[in-house]
């Protein structure tokens, strides 16, 4: 009850602050958008009423925060193999204070690296890959879906058959094919473009000289984008088919708007809600999919601490020496996926105006 | 009434039926009519008879299968670019359901600014202009920055009407503009439409299935049945003495808001339902439901015959075969 | 029980109050309304959109959904076995037994009332076997008879049809047949013809009229079409913004309307038989039911409003026999 109120008030504060800034930038903004702001606050309320949504939101918030600052927090560089100095560190089991001291809390991996510190890098990599896949795959799919749905006829037929082909294409095989072809080329490309290389390694939280690994990550990522967009194309096309029959679209045609403007101003905003929900769910799926690809050895290799790869290595001495690793990284992946899924579920209700407006409201939660 | 503002000649609009190669819905079949400057032409008929399709085709929202649409003497069917934009500025439409004819994600101001921007209307102060325009259709300035869902049905329809007249067109097609509204609101909207017509010298094509409303609004009425015009002429005459058997049936099914009259009048309870426009009956399309069917009706289509100056009926009872 | 039913009454509702708790505020959808229905009569419930007609009738069998709540009131109903129950207080099983059986509904949208996965016949069989132990075979024979009764041609074939295979008018006939399957005492028809053509509307109204007489049931007809009211109802309740403002026999209402709202409403429909220069329209809009105006709810739009109207709510008084109105013009102060 108090959580509902606290979350609601926090969100309202954020909204009010945003309104204040916009109003400063262009005076009169707040009066012109008062209804919009009211709707946001209603969304905030509807969201705060959903317990699982709030839980999901918190998880996502923490995960995002860790992904952003993780590599800065990590107290051990992932490329230092401590096991060289102290053989005891080889797959050291968890070391919990009253019973044990002097070793990392949750144990180490085969190179003697603290698995907690290591996971901070992993967060960043998983997060960036999933974000890139979804935020590149979705717009491509949305664009094609919009055009196919709105134009209909031959264009629709061509785009949708293409979509079918890509959906039928097994993502895994595509990724295997890419893993064998792409990494060398991307690597050569990165060697030539140092600026891009530095930028990419910065956002992935890696050392700049990790060409080979960066290339592997990128090829996983390209493979994923390619299998990712068709889903969006399909659902967008479906929604467009119903929106395009709405009288307000006809009214827009009567105004004389060109197709491009009709699509952007009238069609897209009205098909966006299901897409946002799908994107949220997909961030979970993409995280797991990327981990699965590296688990199968298609992603980055030593010393890059990609979560899926770390789990796959732990398979060697499972469960005697590595149960703690599998358990810890497995839990992390699970929690990330759970967070996005819970958030997506709540967003579905929040973004649907009808559900949103029918939520029972009682002052004070 | 000199030259017509709009003239439709032998208009056909056929739609392909999904999942069938040859079947076609003949939504509008060989319709010809004239609309004169400053008048209101009413179009009535049961749902599915092609009223909306006719209205939308006049405004080029549907592609005509064949036929001509002359606006001020110019065939508009093949217009493109600047010329088309010019036509759009002159001919607008108000849709049946105000809840779906406004973009739910745009505020009223955004919706109303769109035509002004697209047609590059230069104004000093858009906001002031919009507020004045809003007042002219009976809306307060406080509604300007609201979303459609925050307005009532009647208020939404006022916005839709304003969007249609904001560029000061010559012709407006009104597709059942009050059938989604309440009676008291309906009266407001009808009065508003009449005032606007007077003030801006507008020409209306008024589509409705509610004959009482059409009669109140129109100078002339066209009765449609299964994609064809079966009777067209002066509204008073048509109402008092309908000629076509279908018009008679249609008129007697209107409930009259007067208990003694409505319970004592002679009523023809309509028989059957309109057949599908995919496979309309041969000959006169009304013959399966008509109480006066003759042999000729089943085989030959009755032509639209002038029975009085400016008054046409398509029925073998009045034509000489 | 303090109140009981008088002779010939089937339903007596007192002080019914329903509220919806929404983000925008508390919607006072129905505010303390009272009405009664006699055996074998047609009562019309008339009012504009959102004035609470549907909510009122749905509340009778407790069909109010979240976030709505029935806050107050009683609804005495005489069951088939002459037992009088308060619909708002009886246990859930009893109300489930009454709903669809002794009180049946016909809703506005025939499409959503029929499940697309089942045939017309299945719908009728389900409705009957929900309430009575009879063999499905027998009911199916009955179903054909019912379809014949609602004038569906070749009923033997139509029982096997799915809803999408029927036209809108046919669907509404099928819904009516379903609602009649248990020979209800009270049929509630919520805008049964609003989505239909005038020609089909005339057919359906004729049908309802005949069936009502034949089955000797009471009919509550919800509509906003004053033409339909004139055509078939015996008595009328006029609702405005969640309240009943006038109650009269149909002829009295049309020729001697008392409430200013009723008077204006009657003048705002075009009567095609008359030559009308200008329609009367009621200025302004229906007030929001969130924080409705205190006093008379019609006050902001009423041409006769006085100061007392703004401050205090007028109560219902009987001005003439069987003609009641809630307006200060008729109340002595
Ligand atoms: N589920 C709901 N949530 C919130 N408010 C509701 C809900 N259902 C009804 N209301 C409100 O209750 C009031 C009465 O609604 P009701 O459906 O009874 O109107 P009505 O008279 O049947 O109108 P109509 O002619 O449109 O059918 C309205 O203000 C409506 O907005
Ligand atoms: N885009 C379309 N595709 C196929 N059939 C259509 C289309 N639009 C209308 N129709 C059909 O054309 C006929 C006339 O429809 P319409 O003009 O909407 O009727 P009205 O407005 O008189 O109710 C109907 O049978 C309808 O189903
Ligand atoms: S032509 Fe024949 S069938 Fe058609 S309306 Fe006239 S009399 Fe009836
Ligand atoms: S009580 Fe007053 S405001 Fe209400 S209807 Fe009567 S006169 Fe008008
Ligand atoms: Mg139509
Ligand atoms: Mg209702």
Image (tube, coloured by chain):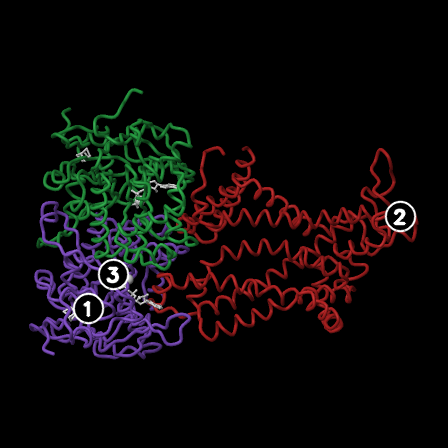
Please tell me the numbered disc located at residue B287.
1
Residue A283 is marked as none
Residue underneath mark 2:
A89
Which residue matches tag 3?
B273
Which chain is drawn using red?
A: A
The CA span between labels 1 and 3 is 12 Å
- Residue at x 30% of width, y 74% of height: B13
> Would residue C146 be seen by someone viewing this image from the given angle?
yes
Measure the C-alpha gap from mark 2 to mark 3.
86 Å
Q: Quadrant of ligand 1?
A: top left
Q: Is residue B287 left or right of residue A247?
A: left
Q: Nearer the viewer, mark 1 or mark 2?
A: 1
Q: Are marks 1 and 3 in contact (CB under 8 Å)?
A: no
Q: Is residue A245 above or below residue A20?
A: below
Mark 1 lies on a secondary structure that is helix
Judging from the image, mark 2 belongs to the subunit labelled A
Secondary structure beneath disc 3? loop
Which colour denotes chain B?
purple
Asked if residue B154 lies left or right of residue B315, the reply is right
> Is the CB of the residue bearing disc 1 within 8 angstroms of ligand 3?
yes
In the displayed structure image, the side of residue C201 where residue A97 appears, left or right: right
Q: Colour of chain C?
A: green
Crowd tier of the residue under label 2, counting other residues whose Cα lies within 10 Å: few below 14, some 14–19, many 20 or above: many
Q: Please state the horizontal and vertical placement of residue C86, each as a whole percent of the image.
A: 33, 27
Comparing A362 with B130, the one in front is: A362
Q: Position of residue C208 (x, y in %)?
A: 23, 47
B121 on left or right of B308: right
Question: Does mark 3 fall on the same chain as mark 1?
Answer: yes
């Amino acid at each position: 009850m108090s959580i509902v109120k606290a979350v609601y008030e926090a969100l309202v504060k954020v909204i009010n602050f945003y309104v204040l800034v916009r109003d400063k930038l262009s005076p009169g903004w707040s009066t012109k958008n008062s209804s919009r702001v009211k709707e946001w606050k209603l969304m905030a309320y509807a969201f705060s009423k959903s317990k699982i949504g709030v839980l999901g939101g918190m998880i996502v918030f923490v995960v995002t925060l860790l992904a952003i600052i993780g590599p800065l927090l990590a107290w051990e560089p992932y490329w230092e193999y401590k096991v060289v100095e102290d053989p005891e560190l080889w797959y050291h089991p968890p070391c919990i204070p009253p019973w044990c001291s002097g070793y990392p809390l949750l144990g180490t991996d085969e190179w003697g690296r603290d698995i907690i510190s290591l996971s901070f890098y992993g967060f960043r990599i998983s997060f960036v890959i999933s974000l890139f896949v979804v935020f590149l795959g979705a717009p491509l799919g949305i664009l094609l879906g919009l055009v196919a749905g709105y134009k209909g006829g031959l264009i629709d037929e061509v785009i949708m058959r293409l979509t079918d082909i890509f959906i039928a294409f097994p993502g895994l095989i595509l990724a295997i094919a890419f893993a064998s072809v792409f990494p060398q080329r991307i690597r050569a490309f990165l060697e030539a473009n140092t600026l891009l290389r530095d930028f990419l390694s910065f956002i992935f939280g890696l050392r700049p000289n990790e060409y080979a690994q960066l290339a592997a990550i990128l090829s996983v990522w390209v493979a994923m984008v390619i299998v990712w967009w068709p889903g969006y194309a399909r659902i967008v096309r479906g929604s467009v088919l119903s929106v395009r029959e709405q009288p307000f679209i006809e009214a827009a045609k009567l105004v004389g708007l060109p197709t491009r403007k009709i699509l952007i101003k009238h069609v897209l905003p009205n098909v966006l809600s299901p897409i946002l929900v799908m994107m949220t769910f997909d961030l979970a799926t993409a995280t797991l999919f990327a981990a699965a690809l590296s688990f199968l050895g298609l992603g980055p290799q030593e010393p890059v601490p990609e979560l899926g790869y770390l789990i796959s290595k732990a398979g060697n001495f499972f469960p005697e020496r590595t149960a703690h690793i599998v358990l810890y990284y497995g839990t992390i992946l699970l929690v990330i996926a759970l967070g996005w899924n819970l958030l997506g579920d709540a967003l579905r209700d929040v973004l649907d105006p009808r559900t949103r407006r029918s939520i029972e409201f009682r002052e004070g939660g | 009434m000199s030259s017509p503002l709009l003239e439709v000649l032998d208009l056909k609009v056929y739609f392909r039926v999904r999942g069938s190669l040859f079947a076609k819905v003949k939504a509008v079949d060989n319709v010809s009519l004239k609309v004169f400057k400053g008048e209101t032409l009413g179009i009535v008929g049961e749902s599915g008879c092609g009223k909306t399709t006719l209205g939308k085709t006049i405004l080029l929202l549907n592609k005509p299968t064949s036929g001509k649409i002359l606006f001020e003497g110019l065939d508009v069917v093949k217009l493109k670019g600047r010329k088309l934009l010019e036509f759009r500025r002159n001919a607008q439409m108000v849709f049946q359901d105000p809840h779906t004819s406004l973009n739910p994600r745009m505020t009223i101001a955004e919706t109303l600014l769109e035509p002004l921007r697209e047609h590059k209307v230069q104004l000093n102060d858009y906001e002031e202009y919009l507020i004045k325009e809003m007042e002219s259709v009976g809306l307060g300035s406080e509604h300007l920055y609201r979303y459609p869902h925050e307005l009532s049905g009647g208020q939404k329809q006022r916005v839709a009407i304003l969007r249609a007249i904001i560029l000061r067109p010559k012709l407006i097609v009104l597709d059942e503009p009050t059938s989604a509204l309440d009676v008291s609101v309906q009266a407001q909207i009808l009065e508003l439409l009449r005032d606007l017509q007077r003030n801006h010298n507008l020409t209306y094509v008024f589509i409705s299935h509610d004959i009482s409303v059409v009669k109140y609004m129109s100078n002339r009425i066209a009765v449609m049945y299964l994609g064809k015009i079966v009777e067209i002429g002066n509204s008073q005459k048509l109402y008092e003495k309908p000629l076509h058997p279908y018009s008679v049936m249609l008129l007697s099914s209107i409930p009259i808001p007067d208990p003694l009259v409505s319970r004592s009048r002679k009523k023809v309870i309509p028989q059957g339902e309109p057949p599908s426009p995919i496979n309309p009956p041969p000959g006169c399309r009304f013959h399966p439901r008509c109480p006066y069917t003759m042999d000729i009706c089943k085989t030959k289509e009755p032509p639209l015959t002038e029975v009085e100056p400016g008054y046409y009926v398509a029925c073998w009872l009045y034509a000489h075969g | 029980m303090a109140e009981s039913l008088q002779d010939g009454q089937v339903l007596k509702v007192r002080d019914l109050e329903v509220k919806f708790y929404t983000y925008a505020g508390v919607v006072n959808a129905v505010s303390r309304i009272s009405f009664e229905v006699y055996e074998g009569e047609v009562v019309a419930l008339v009012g504009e959109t959102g004035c609470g007609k549907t909510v009122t009738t749905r509340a009778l069998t407790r069909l109010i959904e979240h976030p709505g709540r029935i806050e107050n009131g009683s609804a005495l109903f005489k069951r088939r076995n002459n037992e009088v129950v308060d619909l708002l207080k009886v246990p859930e099983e009893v109300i489930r037994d009454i709903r669809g059986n002794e009180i049946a509904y016909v809703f506005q949208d025939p499409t959503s009332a029929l499940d697309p996965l089942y045939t017309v016949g299945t719908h009728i069989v389900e409705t009957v076997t929900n309430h009575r132990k009879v063999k499905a075979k027998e009911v199916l024979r009955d179903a054909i008879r019912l379809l014949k009764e609602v004038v569906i041609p070749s009923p033997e074939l139509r029982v096997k049809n799915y809803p999408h295979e029927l036209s809108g008018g046919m669907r509404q006939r099928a819904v009516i047949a379903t609602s009649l399957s248990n020979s209800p005492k009270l049929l509630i028809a919520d805008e049964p013809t609003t989505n239909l053509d005038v020609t089909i509307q005339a057919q359906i109204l004729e049908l309802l009229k005949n069936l009502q007489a034949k089955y000797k049931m009471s009919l509550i007809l919800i509509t906003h079409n004053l033409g339909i009211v004139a055509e078939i109802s015996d008595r009328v309740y006029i609702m405005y913004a969640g309240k009943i403002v006038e109650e009269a026999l149909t002829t009295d209402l049309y020729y001697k309307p008392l409430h200013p709202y009723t008077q204006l409403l009657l003048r705002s429909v075009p009567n095609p038989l008359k030559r009308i220069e200008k329609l009367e329209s009621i200025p302004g809009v229906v007030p929001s039911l969130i924080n409705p105006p205190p006093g008379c709810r019609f006050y902001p739009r009423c041409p006769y409003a006085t100061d007392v109207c703004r401050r205090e709510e007028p109560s219902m008084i009987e001005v003439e026999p069987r003609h009641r109105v809630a307006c200060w013009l008729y109340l002595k102060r």
